[in-house]
């Protein structure tokens, strides 16, 4: 049987454990929560590494999403496949870091009215150059 003193010690220890577990739960971050925006540069075709450009050429007829590493940089590529006309552009809505990954969100923007008569197919894609990270890239 426990003495009054032992019961008090056990109660204090139990209270300490409860406080520690509540604090540990509060300290955990949501893995989807944005930590920070990730800086990037949109790369012109003439500045894309040759090996990456060759891969893009192979894939550009179909929609694609890929990454490529070269000389300490991460290249994030999004292609929208064959489009009936030219004049398309791509908006980068977000590139941000979470605890577990980088998230990239882009949209294809349609051609303006001046492109209506243009029937030459195009293959819109974008290449973002950013600091290299080991984190996986998630495409939204």
Image: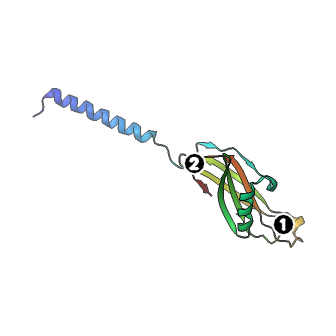
Residue for point 69% across, 44% down: 39
Disc 2, SS: loop
Q: Which residue is mark 2?
A: 134
Left or right relative to 84: residue 19: left
The N terminus, quarter of image: top left
The residue most toward the top is 5
> At which x and y percent is residue 69?
65, 52
Q: Residue 76 at x, y = what percent?
A: 68, 54
Name the residue that disc number 1 marks: 86
Residues 124 and 3: in front is 124
Task: Give x and y (percent) for residue 103.
Answer: 61, 52
**Residue for point 81% across, 68% down:** 122
From what the image shows, is residue 102 above or below residue 61?
above
For residue 1, side relative to residue 42 (left or right):
left
Residue under the image location 87 percent in, 67 percent down: 115
**Which colour assignment does the render follow?**
rainbow
Q: Residues within 10 Å of mark 2 (few under 14, many from 20)?
A: few
- Name the N-terminal-most of marks 2 and 1: 1
Classify mark 1: residues with Cα within 10 Å, few (<14), some (14-19) or many (20+): many
In which quarter of the view is residue 2 placed? Answer: top left
Residue contact between numbered discs 2 and 1, judged by CB atoms under 8 Å: no
Q: Tell me, for residue 15, which label it has, or none.
A: none
Circle 1: element type:
loop
Residue drawn where x is 84% and y is 66% of the image: 86
Q: Quadrant of residue 90?
A: bottom right
On screen, residue 125 above or below 95:
below
Q: Where residue 133 sits: x, y (%)?
A: 60, 46
Front position among marks 2 and 1: 2
Mark 2–mark 1 distance (CA, rounded to whole Å): 35 Å
Answer left or right for 5 relative to 94. left
- Looking at the rendered image, the quarter that the C terminus falls into is bottom right
């Amino acid at each position: 049987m426990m003495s009054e003193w032992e019961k008090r010690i056990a109660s204090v220890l139990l209270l300490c454990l409860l406080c520690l577990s509540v604090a540990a739960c509060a300290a955990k971050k949501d893995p989807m929560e944005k930590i920070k925006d990730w800086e990037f540069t949109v790369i012109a075709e003439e500045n894309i590494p040759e090996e990456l450009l060759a891969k893009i050429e192979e894939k550009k007829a179909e929609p694609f999403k890929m990454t490529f590493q070269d000389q300490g940089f991460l290249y994030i590529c999004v292609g929208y496949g064959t489009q009936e006309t030219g004049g398309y552009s791509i908006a980068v809505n977000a590139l941000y870091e979470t605890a577990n990954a980088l998230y990239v969100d882009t949209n294809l923007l349609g051609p303006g009215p001046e492109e209506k008569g243009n029937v030459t197919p195009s293959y819109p894609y974008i290449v973002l150059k950013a600091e290299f990270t080991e984190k996986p890239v998630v495409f939204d």
